[in-house]
Amino acid sequence: MQLGLKAGVNDRQIKDRLQYHPSVFEFHLTEEDVASAGLKRLRDKIQFIRNQGVQHIILHHPMNFEGGHLELSMSEASSPARYRFLWQSTLDLVQLAQAEDVQLLVHGSYDEPVEQLTVGYRNLTEAAEVLFKRMDYLNKIGHDHLFFENSISPLFYYGNPDLDQAILAKGYRLAFDTSHCFIKYHGDNDVLVQSLQTLKPAIAHYHLVDSLGLKHDGLELGTGRIDWRRVVPVLNPAATNIYEVQLADQNDAREMVASHQYLTALAADLQH
């Protein structure tokens, strides 16, 4: 198991994470981080992290702009400024990821209400068609440096056997958040394990996080209801991972590190 940690573009957080010598580092970006000055700072941080011996660096596309989620499917009419920011930031980050040989994580969708997801569209089906066309485009221009993450949204999620097969057929590189799939199916470990197994060949990155399966709770591994003894054997060993758990203090990664210790011990036990 790899030690993968997450932080903002913040010197105190970066220093805290680096003391554990992670092999994977994921930057959680904000809208300020992808303005022109922010991109320059981000490039410097990428180079600094790499010089500290971190092998794998991931850029998590900003979740929000001016208080609203950046839905990849959004229509320009729904919020012209947010739409422009979505595309400018995504294309800038694709270019940066390629130039610096790092990975960009883009959410296929978040969990906005259906009435928000369908603004400017007749229904969810039309919104989903637009979403997959846009994902096809981003996959084409950024393929080796980009992957898409699941959510509990009706537009892009994992766990439905037919949809999983359709996503697999697209040839996308995927990021799999264990808690999102678990929550989407109300705490069903059978669905989670089956989806992990089905999508395994396409998964390039994991967000390993526990949950009670009721809502976004971001629990430390071993404290929720995910059956990690079943999950570990179906993980793709070629993929990277981070522990995306809620921290009591954003400047202290102890819950992430404890999650790694839990999973490392479990993996060792399973090998006996």
Image (tube, rainbow, N blue to C red):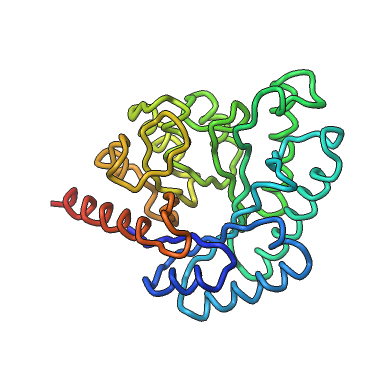
Percent position of residue 58, x then y: 55, 60
Q: Is residue 38 above or below residue 258?
A: below
- Is residue 135 shown to the viewer in this render? no
| On-image quarter of the N terminus | bottom left
Percent position of residue 271, x then y: 18, 52
Q: Is residue 89 above or below residue 21?
A: above
**Image quarter of residue 48:** bottom right
Give the mark count: 0
Percent position of residue 69, x then y: 68, 41
Q: Looking at the image, which residue is at 60% across and 59% down?
A: 59
- Is residue 253 shown to the viewer in this render? yes
Q: Looking at the image, which residue is at 28% across and 52% down?
A: 263
Residue that sits furthest to the top in the current view: 122
**Image quarter of residue 45:** bottom right
Q: Looking at the image, which residue is at 44% across and 68% down?
A: 17
Percent position of residue 34, x then y: 72, 61
Q: Is residue 80 shown left or right of residue 237?
A: right
Closer-to-camera residue (272/38): 38
Closer-to-camera residue (66/113): 66
Closer-to-camera residue (76/68): 68
Q: Is residue 66 shown left or right of residue 158?
A: right
Q: Looking at the image, which residue is at 63% across and 37% down?
A: 109
Q: Is residue 208 above or below residue 158?
A: below
Residue that sits furthest to the bottom in the current view: 51
Residue that sits furthest to the front in the current view: 249
